[in-house]
Image: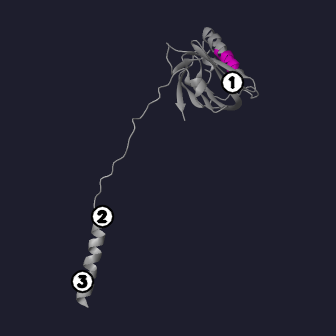
Amino acid sequence: MNKIIRVSLLGLLFVVLSACQRTEQAFLTQPVKEVLPTKENLTTQQNFLLLQKDSQLFPQSQGVYDVIGDQLTIVKQYVPAVDSTKMQANTIVIEQKKLEQVKQDFQRSFPGLQYEDDPYKVYEQKFTQTKVELHDGYFVLRAQPSFEQTFQFVDNSDTKVIDDNGTIYEIQYSD
């Protein structure tokens, strides 16, 4: 009886060890084709972002245009104004002009929303029926209800654009 158990265990060990043997497998691979961003992708891609990289002299701390299919979401935050009691007269005039520029940008970007004098307020609005019109050196982003913004390509780049306020955005494409 002891002999039968030993032979059975030895047989079981042989089966387990043979299941663990290494087998070589070959996979057919195809070279990965990287798609480089081009201006033409703006009209053919379903999803892309315009992500603020530099606001130059415009008082905006963050800006994003997120296009997913025909949906557009704009998110912006404006830099707070300087305390006018601590400024000289010529600086007050400059700050008032910047505030007017912010309010104009706000009305264009967020129709239907109310501008608040809160320096930490992040504004967001969603639009539908988004269309991109590509032209030589610039493109126009349009959406409903009543949104239109023109972006100029910077230095003939396919991934950097600038808006009317001098804010530079980077174009990022996604699937």
**Residue highlighted by disc 3:** 6
Real-space Cα separation, disc 3 to disc 1, in angstroms: 82 Å
Q: Which range is magenta?
A: 98-106
* Residue position marked by numbered label 1 in the rendering: 109
Secondary element at tag 2: loop
Give the structural element (helix, strand or loop) at label 3: helix
Task: Please tell me the numbered disc located at residue 20.
Answer: 2
Image quadrant occupied by the N terminus: bottom left
- Residue type of the residue flagged with mark 3: Arg
Q: Amino acid at mark 1?
A: Ser
Q: Give the mark, 3 or 1, whose residue is nearer the N terminus.
A: 3
Q: Nearer the viewer, mark 1 or mark 2?
A: 2
Kind of residue indicated by mark 2: Cys
Secondary-structure class at tag 1: helix
How far is disc 1 from disc 2 in space, using C-alphas? Answer: 63 Å
- Image coordinates of residue 162 in percent, x first then y, are 56, 17
Say above or below: 127 vs 135.
below
